[in-house]
Image (cartoon, rainbow, N blue to C red):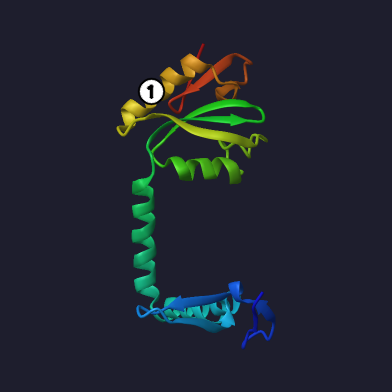
Amino acid sequence: MESKVCTKCNKNLAISEYYTITSKYGSTYTYNYCKKCHYTHSTKAIAKKWRKDNKERWHVDVKKATKAYHGRQSKGVYLLVTTKGLYIGATDKFESRIQQHRTSNFGGNMKFKGAKVLYATLVQEVNDRKERLEAEKRWIKKLRPSLNLVFNSDYKKESKIGGKYIKK
C-alpha cells in the first residue's frame, strides 16, 4: 500500500487519504496535503473568510437557499410511529416538521411528549391548506392515533383535529 507524508500535519497516510486529480490528457496529480488538512486549512478557511467579507450577500444567499429548500418539501398529512403510539399531523414542510418532532422540546412535538420517533411517512400529499386540514381530520378518524388524544381539565376525552379540540 502506497503512503505519503502530509505537508501540513506531517502524518504518514495512505494515498486514499489524499485528493488525486486527473487532467484531460490522462496525467494524475496527488495533493501534498491530506483531505482533512485540505478541508480545514483551505476550503473551510476560505469559506469562512468569504462569509465574513460578504455578510450581506451571504445572508441573501442563505435566505434564498432556505426558501428553495422549504419549497421543495412535501406538503400533506403525515403519520409518526413513536415509542408511545401513533400520531397524525398536517404540514407544508414535511422534512422540517419531522426534524422538529425529533429534536424540539416545544409543546406539540414528540420529544416534548417523551416519545421517540421511530418512523415517519407522508400518508397523503395535499397542497391546499384547507384540504390538508380536512384530510388530517379524516386520517385521525380512520386511524384513531393515541397521541392525538388529550384530556381536558374535566377529564373528558377530546381529539385534536386540524388544530382544534373537538369533543367526542
The percent position of residue 146, horizontal first and vertical second, equals: 60, 21
Residue at (58% x, 25% y) in the render:
86
Q: Nearer the viewer, residue 63 or 123?
A: 123
Q: Is residue 69 above or below residue 137?
A: below
Q: Is residue 131 left or right of residue 32?
A: left
User: Residue furthest toward the bottom?
Assistant: 7
Q: Which residue is mark 1?
A: 135
Q: Nearer the viewer, residue 134 or 10?
A: 10
User: Residue furthest toward the top?
Assistant: 168
Q: Nearer the viewer, residue 110 or 162?
A: 110
Q: Is residue 45 above or below residue 125?
A: below
Tag 1: residue type? Ala
Q: Secondary structure at mark 1?
A: helix
Instruction: Say few, some or many: other residues with alpha carbon within 10 Å of mark 1 (under 14 / 14 to 19 / 20 or more).
Output: many
Residue at (57% x, 34% y) in the render:
119
Image quadrant of residue 53?
bottom left
Q: Is residue 127 left or right of residue 152?
A: left
Q: Is residue 120 visible?
A: yes
Residue at (46% x, 77% y) in the render:
21
Q: Nearer the viewer, residue 106 or 23?
A: 23
User: Residue furthest toward the left?
Assistant: 128
Q: Is residue 142 left or right of residue 109?
A: left
Image quadrant of residue 65?
bottom left
